[in-house]
Image (tube, grey):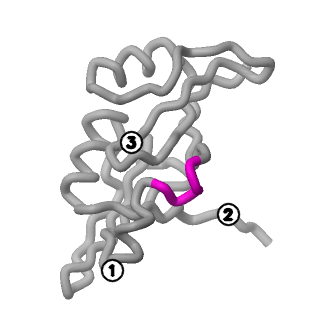
């Protein structure tokens, strides 16, 4: 049996706002954007069209969902963006206004820096050794 995580849901304020940020700031691509009716959409974005696990952008529909936007993990790093060229991607993200919480650091496992998305979710930009 083959199993995998098909997508990771990320609560967002607005579909188009989120799409624009992930495409511009993280150089993601829109994998799918389908109207489901009633104001709901199936929106998948990913670092590449063939990425194993895309993000499902889920527009907050209730006050409870909006309250958790940007803090789905209680302030911990939520997502890990792996790269084959940390310096390239770090520089590009800085030019797009991405907020980093720290300078790049070298760890036993690779080069890493914590950044946040437009809603405040914490991510690691990470180049493994």
Between discs 1 and 3, the one toward the N terminus: 1
Residue 4: mark: 2
Q: Which of the 4 image quadrants contains residue 36?
A: bottom left
Q: Quadrant of residue 14?
A: bottom left
Density class for disc 1 (Cα within 10 Å; few <14, some 14-19, many ≥20) is few
Q: Is residue 105 magenta?
A: no
What is the quadrant of the N terminus in the image? bottom right
Choose the circle earlier in sequence order: 2 or 1: 2
Question: Residue 56: x and y, percent?
Answer: 42, 63
Question: Between tags 2 and 1, which lies in front?
Answer: 1
Discs 2, 3 touching: Cβ within 8 Å: no
Q: What residue would you read off at disc 1?
A: 62
User: Can you tell which of label 2 and label 3 is closer to the viewer?
Assistant: 3
Of callouts 2 and 3, the N-terminal one? 2
What is the spatial separation of the Cα atoms under label 1 and label 3, in whole angstroms? Answer: 21 Å
Q: Residues within 10 Å of mark 2 (few under 14, many from 20)?
A: few
Q: Tell me where the magenta segment starts and ends, as one range.
A: 71-75
Mark 3 falls on what kind of element? Answer: loop
Vertically, is 53 above or below 29? Answer: below
Task: Give the labeled residue for mark 3.
Answer: 117
Instruction: Identify the residue at horizontal 63%, vertical 15% (top origin).
Output: 105
Left or right: residue 30 versus residue 73 is left
Q: Quadrant of residue 92?
A: top left
- Asked whether, in this view, residue 93 is left or right of residue 13, the answer is right
Q: Quadrant of the C terminus?
A: top right
State yes or no: discs 2 and 1 in contact (Cβ < 8 Å): no
């Amino acid at each position: 049996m083959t199993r995998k995580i098909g997508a990771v849901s990320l609560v967002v304020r607005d579909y188009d706002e989120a799409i624009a940020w992930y495409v511009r700031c993280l150089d993601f691509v829109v994998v799918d954007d389908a109207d489901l009716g009633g104001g709901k959409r199936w929106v998948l974005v990913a670092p590449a069209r063939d990425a194993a696990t895309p993000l499902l952008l889920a527009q907050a529909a209730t006050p409870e969902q909006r309250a958790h936007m940007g803090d789905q993990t209680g302030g911990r790093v939520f997502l890990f963006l792996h790269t084959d060229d940390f310096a390239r991607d770090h520089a590009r993200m800085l030019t797009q206004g991405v907020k980093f919480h720290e300078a790049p650091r070298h760890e036993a496992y690779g080069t890493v820096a914590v950044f946040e998305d437009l809603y405040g979710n914490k991510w690691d930009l990470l180049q493994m050794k």
